[in-house]
Amino acid sequence: MRIDIVTVLPSLLDSFLHHSIVQRAQDKKLVDLKIHNLRDYSVNKHKTVDDYAFGGGAGMVLMIEPIVNCLEHLKKERKYQEIVYMSPDGKSFNQAMANELSLVENMIIICGHYKGIDERIREHFITREISIGDYVLSGGELPAAVLSDAVIRLLPGVLSNESSALSDSFQDGLVAAPVYTRPADFRGMEVPKILLSGHEKEIDKWRFEQSIKRTEQRRPDKENKGSN
């Protein structure tokens, strides 16, 4: 998979690129993750990428020309199935969307900034707008990192245990069951005995029941969706 992230603040993504699962995925050549500084595609000597909004109002807007220049440059090299814009008014990101995007071969993620981007980009170039929550951040870099991490960990070969991603919360519409590790008894706080029994079918049944219970208690908006 190839992921290209377009941003005015590439340094914000440095740590994300070079640690944990994302770094291992790149080392294994399972994902090619590139960060592009939007200022490199500006057409003036000051590397300007933002301007005042027509009609007035507070805040600056990312200009159309640098973004289109960047997109056209990237599209000369390969075909992109998705051009994603991270926006608070986009469709709410969830596990099903992560699963869908993990099947994409090439994807561009545009990070918004200031008051957003010129609407003509959204109208003519963006294939999907995604929000990670009903709140506003200073820019789209953190949302882009969240999206990329959620997608990359689903790629075959990225996780050492291939079944790990399949048992994540929300893969079946339910939140995950509680998990425990050693010691089995810590200061009188004991692990449920079923998990120590070795009876795989009974353990699976217990975990499913716990997932339903937790979903009802903690995420009632997801209730009953896992039994379909």
Image: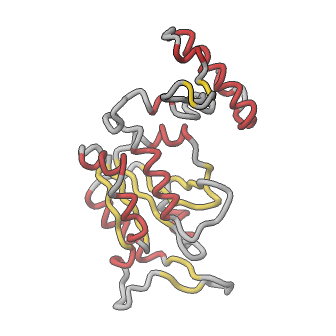
Residue situated in front as seen by the camera: 195 or 77: 195
Colouring method of the image: secondary structure
Q: Residue at x 30, y 46 (%)?
A: 24
Give above or below for 102 relative to 57.
above
Q: Left of 146 or right of it: where is 16?
A: left
Q: Residue at x 49, y 42 (%)?
A: 98
Give above or below for 220 relative to 142.
above
x then y, percent, for residue 95: 54, 39
Q: Residue at x 29, y 52 (%)?
A: 32
Q: Assign the C terminus to one quadrant of the image.
A: top right
Residue lying farthest to the front in this orientation: 187
Residue situated in front as seen by the camera: 130 or 79: 130
Labels in figure, total: 0
x then y, percent, for residue 107: 39, 52
x then y, percent, for residue 35: 35, 64
x then y, percent, for residue 198: 48, 11
Residue lying farthest to the bottom in this orientation: 45
Q: Left of 14 or right of it: where is 53?
A: right
Q: Residue at x 48, y 58 (%)?
A: 144
